[in-house]
Amino acid sequence: MATAYTECLNWVCPDVPMAPVALVTNAIRDAVIELCEKSLIYRQELQQINVLASTSTTTTAAASSGATAVVVASITGFAANDTLTVDLTDGTKWRGHVSGTPSGSTINLDGALNQNVESGATVTRLVYLYTVTYPSGFTLAKGLQAWFNDAPIDPISPDDLDTEFNNTSFGWVGVNWRTDVNLPTRWYMEDTNTVGILMSPSAGGALRINAALKPTRASTTFPTVIYEDYIETIAHGAKARIMLIPKKPYSDKETGKYHELEFNGLVGEARLIAAKGSTRGPLRTHTVFGLR
């Protein structure tokens, strides 16, 4: 069930009688969004993502250093802008993207090869980024957990990708997430709408993500369960936002600060409740090996 932001006006308007209704409505929405961002109270398992196995083919002709195309046995599974690697004669891999739609037996590259390529060299399409689908009116507050084929996989920061998976003296030695194919063991959020998995999978499967969500800026409603449990918190947040706007008929810095403190305190309580799942179970700490 959903509640319109306008249904919360009576919790806020009496204390800011000079404030325009549109301003109050926006302040209520912003307070709900901030509550969800900071407390992570609204959680859902997102729509399952179909993970594709990496696609490989082989070259049917040699290519010289500086070439911007390779001739392959099959272009099936390769499309414009795909990330791909090409095995080079020195044992390394060229990594780049498909330029344009492959045609016939030719894949055009978005850059020049830096070494020669032999006939029979492997060309691999890497697929490790996927679009995330959210319920209508919601976006990501924070990714919480992920499973690949029902096996839990650990989160990793995008800033740690090279440290953990592309470093000869630290992390997973001998592994390069930019070029290698293997069973995914990590996940990260590339941006709000894109999830990444490490490494590009050797076999397809299903990726599931449990996430904390928040309403979008364009939303007109929010979950009724949040209204029922946190309307007083939301009202404090909305009043603080309105009263702390300077030089307006409804400005009241002292009272606004009071509502801001109340809001922040109640958000902290909500975060603890969300972490415990509204149960009496204690929060437990877990030893994490290899955490850097």
Image (cartoon, helix red, strand yellow):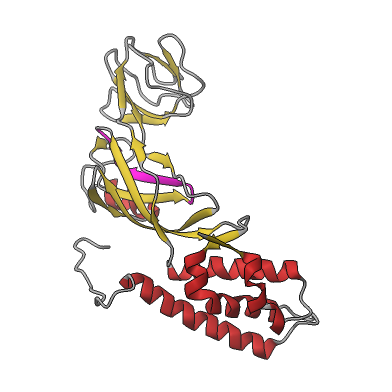
Figure label count: 0
Please provide percent x and percent y for residue 167: 27, 48
Please provide percent x and percent y for residue 266: 48, 81
Q: Describe residue 207's horizontal placement relative to residue 183 as left or right.
A: right
| 199 in magenta | yes
State whether residue 126 is above or below residue 210: above
Please provide percent x and percent y for residue 135: 48, 50
Tell me what residue is drawn at x 28 percent, y 52 percent: 164
Residue most toward the front?
1
Q: Nearer the viewer, residue 154 or 3?
A: 3
Tell me what residue is drawn at x 27 percent, y 49 percent: 147
Please provide percent x and percent y for residue 25: 68, 67
State whether residue 195 is above or below residue 22: above
| 34 in magenta | no
Q: What type of secondary structure mainly makes up the magenta span? A: strand
In the rendered image, which quarter is residue 32 located in?
A: bottom right
Q: Describe residue 239's horizontal placement relative to residue 291 as left or right.
A: right
Residue most toward the bottom?
254
In the rendered image, which quarter is residue 183 located in?
A: top left
In the rendered image, which quarter is residue 22 located in?
A: bottom right
State whether residue 272 is above or below residue 115: below
Tell me what residue is drawn at x 40 percent, y 22 percent: 78
Tell me what residue is drawn at x 74 percent, y 83 percent: 251
Q: Describe residue 259's horizontal placement relative to residue 207 as left or right.
A: right
State whether residue 164 is above or below residue 65: below
Classify the position of the C terminus by image quarter.
Answer: bottom left
Which span of residues is magenta-colored? 192-202
Q: Nearer the viewer, residue 39 or 42?
A: 42
Q: Nearer the viewer, residue 223 or 251?
A: 223
